[in-house]
Image: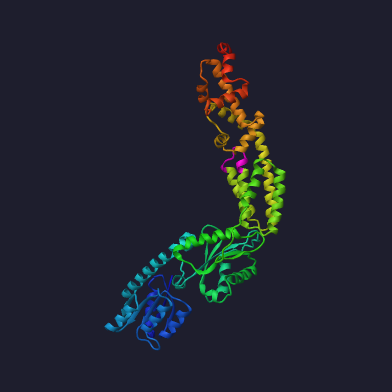
């Protein structure tokens, strides 16, 4: 619905125009009428409108003066000029003031409807274009039919991102209506617009940069919002700056805010980030994560649970970032899935759901309890699965290795083939052969080489080395002697003439 103001000093004419529009079924709402230019201008200073229908001849401030002043307030205002005069001078001035169209009195219904239909189409087209940058960051369903008004489109706006503090009580009031009420109360009389974010449960906030004139710093403004939201039981984390946003770079600037809020939100303390100031990167977390995932791979359940319990306690006391905790728990979930033999989409989905539910707990203590219980359960599951599937997996790997005795097979090749880690392959081989993968593989190769020498005594050593994918015959001879106690030549001599009997 588009808003319109009618300025006309003749009451009968004003009533006629108003009645014609109200019966037209056009998406236009007459929000105000005025009998002179000053009255109309005073209204538009307080409340912008989309369409101005004005007479030229009015007391106090005539139509052309009103248009000139109103355009300074809202440059996108659509104006229809009504006059009983058709002289060139008025027409020329109206054109200079970018009047959309003009009608002569008495105003006829068909002419008025035709002009207003074109205005509606023009405004709708412009609004669609102006909302285009927002489609990358806000849901399409929310933007559909959204009206932002001239304040948003014609003046600079600043961008902020606001999210609910992790592990804070969820009282069911993390809603757009609640946030909008608080934000408007803090920002008035400056404009403030709230949008749901497209990719999370956070909210995007646009405000007029003039707000910075009322607050000493950006943080001071955010703190005033924080106080108001705390009074209704909402704890927040927030990031942004009063620098006007470039709408052509909106997606990029939104992504930066999202990244910073992801990175800097703390477990135990609400964070307000003025992004005009550089935030130092935190390092050294990858090694810590690796220590946990290694313990999962090595099935070290008790050391793992002790270390995790200690980490969770220290993290809260040392203001650890929520992002770091989220990253660790996600990595632990992935490690458990990868450690499970024959894990599939069901296990990955279950782990992802469990991680999400734990991180959404409304108290950090409950999160810690859930996390430790979940990890203990996963270790039990690993032990159960390993007992059932270890022997079966070895049988499959053993058959595969025997088929590739003449190739150059590595432990990483086996890991990739059976979708497990290289360290897990190593443990399985060790468990069922009491030796390393390399020793086990070489033993199979040399056993087959001995068989070939017994069956074909004339076979050259180089040909045999090449057949088993050794880099050179000297290395093959050394490995052969390590396993049999004889060089290939000595082995041939010792078994000469026995090949047919042995086979």
Residue 329 pos. (x, y %): 63, 50
Residue 448 pos. (x, y %): 56, 22
Depth order, front residue of 208/476: 476
Depth order, front residue of 339/281: 281
Scheme of colours in the image: rainbow
Residue 173 pos. (x, y %): 61, 64
Image point (61%, 60%), residue name:
265
Please give the range of residues in magenta.
Answer: 337-345
Quadrant placement of the N terminus: bottom left
Instruction: Confirm whether residue 107 shows in the render.
Output: no
Image point (46%, 66%), residue name:
246
Image point (46%, 80%), residue name:
45
Residue 271, by quadrant, is: bottom right
Q: Is residue 211 above or below residue 400?
A: below
Q: Is residue 241 above or below residue 332?
A: below
Residue 39, by quadrant, is: bottom left
Q: Is residue 340 magenta?
A: yes
Q: Is residue 307 above or below residue 168?
A: above
Residue 14 pos. (x, y %): 38, 82
Residue, far front: 474
Depth order, front residue of 42/285: 285
Quadrant placement of the C terminus: top right
Mark count: 0
Q: Is residue 417 magenta?
A: no
Q: Is residue 40 left or right of residue 265?
A: left
Instruction: Confirm whether residue 263 shows in the render.
Output: yes
Q: Is residue 40 left or right of residue 161?
A: left
């Amino acid at each position: 619905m588009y808003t319109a103001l009618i300025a006309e000093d003749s009451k009968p004419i004003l009533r006629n125009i108003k009645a014609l529009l109200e019966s037209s079924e056009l998406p236009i709402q007459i929000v105000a009428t005025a009998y002179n230019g000053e009255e109309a201008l005073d209204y538009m200073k307080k409340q912008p409108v989309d369409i101005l229908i004005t007479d030229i001849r009015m007391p106090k401030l005539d139509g052309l003066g009103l248009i000139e002043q109103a355009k300074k307030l809202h440059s996108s205002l659509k104006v229809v000029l009504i006059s009983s005069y058709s002289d060139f001078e008025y027409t020329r001035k109206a054109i200079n003031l970018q009047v959309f169209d003009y009608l002569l009195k008495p105003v006829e219904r068909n002419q008025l409807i035709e002009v207003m239909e074109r205005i509606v189409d023009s405004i709708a087209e412009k609004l669609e274009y102006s909302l285009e940058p927002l489609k990358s960051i806000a849901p399409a369903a929310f933007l559909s039919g959204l009206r932002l008004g001239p304040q948003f489109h014609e003046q600079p706006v600043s961008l902020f991102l606001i999210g609910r503090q992790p592990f804070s009580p969820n009282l069911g009031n993390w809603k757009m209506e609640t946030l909008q009420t608080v934000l408007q109360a803090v920002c008035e009389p400056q404009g403030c617009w709230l949008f749901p974010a497209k990719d999370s449960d956070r909210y995007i906030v646009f405000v007029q940069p003039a707000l910075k004139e009322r607050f000493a710093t950006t943080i001071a403004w955010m703190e005033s919002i924080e106080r108001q939201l705390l009074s209704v039981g909402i704890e927040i984390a927030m990031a942004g700056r009063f620098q006007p946003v470039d709408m052509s770079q909106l997606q990029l600037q939104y992504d930066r805010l999202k990244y910073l809020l992801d990175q800097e939100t703390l477990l135990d303390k609400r964070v307000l980030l003025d992004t005009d100031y550089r935030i130092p990167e935190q390092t050294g977390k990858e090694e810590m994560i690796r220590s946990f995932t290694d313990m999962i791979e090595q099935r070290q359940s008790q050391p793992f649970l002790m270390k995790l319990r200690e980490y969770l306690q220290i993290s809260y006391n040392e203001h650890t970032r929520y992002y770091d905790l989220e990253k660790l728990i996600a990595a632990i979930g992935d490690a458990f899935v990868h450690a499970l033999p024959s894990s599939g989409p069901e296990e990955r989905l279950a782990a992802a759901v469990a991680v999400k539910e734990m991180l959404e707990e409304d108290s950090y203590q409950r999160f810690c309890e859930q996390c430790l219980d979940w990890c203990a359960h996963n270790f039990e599951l690993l032990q159960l699965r390993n007992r059932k599937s270890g022997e079966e997996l070895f049988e499959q790997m053993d058959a595969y290795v025997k088929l590739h005795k003449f190739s150059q097979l590595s432990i990483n090749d086996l890991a990739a083939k059976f979708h497990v880690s290289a360290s897990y392959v190593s443990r399985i081989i060790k468990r069922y052969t009491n030796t390393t993968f390399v020793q086990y593989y070489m033993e199979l190769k040399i056993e087959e080489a001995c068989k070939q020498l017994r069956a074909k005594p004339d076979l050259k050593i180089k040909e045999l080395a090449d057949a088993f994918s050794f880099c050179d015959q000297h290395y093959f001879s050394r490995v052969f002697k390590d396993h049999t106690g004889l060089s290939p030549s000595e082995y041939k001599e010792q078994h000469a003439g026995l090949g047919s009997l042995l086979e």
